[in-house]
Amino acid sequence: MAKFTFRGGIHPDDGKRLTAEKPVRAYVTRGEAVYPLSQHIGAPAKPLVKKGDRVVAGQKIAEASGLVSANIHSAVSGTVKALEKREVPGSGRMDCIVIDNDGMFEEADFASKVRPLEKLFREDVISVIREAGVVGMGGAGFPTDVKLSPRNESAIDCIIVNGAECEPYLTSDYRRMMEEPEKLVEGLAIVLGLFKGAQGIIAIEDNKPEAIRLLREKVEDQPRIRVNKLKTKYPQGAERQLIYANTGRYVNSNMLPADAGCIVHNVDTIISIYEAVILGRPVISRVVTVTGDCIADPCNFIVPIGTSYLELIEAAGGFTKEPAKVISGGPMMGKALYTLDVPVVKGTSSILALSRDAVAESTPTQCIKCGKCVSICPGRVEPYLLADLAEAKDTDGFLKNNGMECCECGCCSYVCPAKRHLTQTIAGTRKQVLANRKRG
């Protein structure tokens, strides 16, 4: 049977063997809990608490401040210690609510607010998801209630669950698929209930055969859901590539997935939808892979949002040696950290500690026009040329040569024999173009 895929891509060492077969462990945070007001795309949330207030786990401590924004809930009980700027992974300093954890984990009454699904209208389900603060948990952080409210809901005919997890080292989604498949299937069924003409696809790379087998068993009585086996290749889980692999539809930088009749959700997002609608539970925890060759006991934790990275690394046995680089996320698209005194946020999928910094060790040289970056580019652009144009600050040339179609996956930098920082150079110009457009 043919496997679903796309043009281009690479095959880096996936590193998943370190944690793939280790069941998720619950971690109970000990120290203070830190909640950035921007854990999502859009406007920062507005604080609902002040210094000295007592809060309980599950209590809403900041509310969405616009259409594209998201509520934030405390994962611990305790006293609000401060509202101040703190370091946030990959984002610098940001306004945060800091809670002094009392260790009691007194919870709000979730169950009393739950209404039977069959009694909820479409607007009710979306309202529950918004109230729970559900966002894209794969890292993008787009508010899920907004994604589920396209201009033309009747045009949506495909809901794709991204179970590819193509980023090396990460296994948090895999463990959720293996350990909580019922929540995943029922969460997808909830979303399909919002789009009567849509079919559901759970898309999984073929390096996860047990997950494919298990979920195919779970969807046997779900006529609107199927499991697609994807070819293992990075970046198979990138939104545009995932849509093309599963539907044959092309999405460019001027389109939203909804323009192609699709909505894509991460595994953790779908499970969060299930927990919000069926259990009344807001987003107060997530699964995080703590891994790398510098970690004593690489593993997956289910972690209260707001927990310190330092705490999690200690819980995984600490460092076996001083890492050359620690990354929030995976090695291809994650963000290198200059401090570990940062909190787990909704989009934290992994903490990766590596003994080698391959980027720092390499010295870029002149492009040899080998064409490798062009042959593997999933965005079908010419990375070497775009990087030249970006370095020359030729924005017009950059746009003329489809620079905005780059998805910043890092494939070109990975294969470049000259060790040029192609992705970073292109990304800088893309960021500037988007900022200029936003300014008008």
Image (spheres, helix red, strand yellow):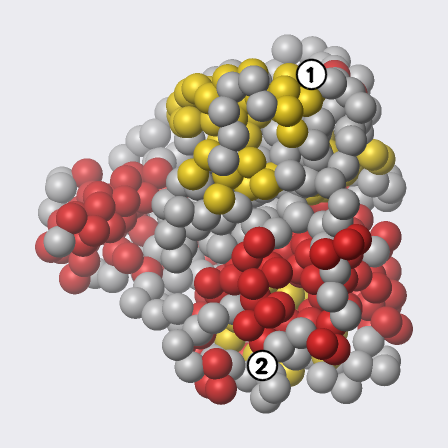
Picture coordinates of residue 336, whole percent (x, y) = 49, 27
Q: Callout 2: helix, strand or loop?
A: loop
**The quarter of the displayed image where residue 120 is located:** bottom right
**The quarter of the displayed image where residue 222 is located:** bottom right
At 71% from the left edge and 76% from the top edge, which residue is drawn?
Answer: 119
Q: Which disc, if any, is residue 31?
A: 1
Picture coordinates of residue 303, whole percent (x, y) = 72, 34
At 64% from the left edge and 82% from the top edge, which residue is drawn?
Answer: 199
**Image check: 151 left or right of 432?**
right
Give the residue at mark 2: 195
At 64% from the left edge and 39% from the top edge, which residue is drawn?
Answer: 59
Name the foreground residue: 271 vs 310.
271
Q: Residues within 10 Å of mark 1 (few under 14, many from 20)?
A: some
**Image check: 282 left or right of 92?**
right
The amino acid beneath tag 1 is Gly
Disc on the earlier residue, 2 or 1: 1
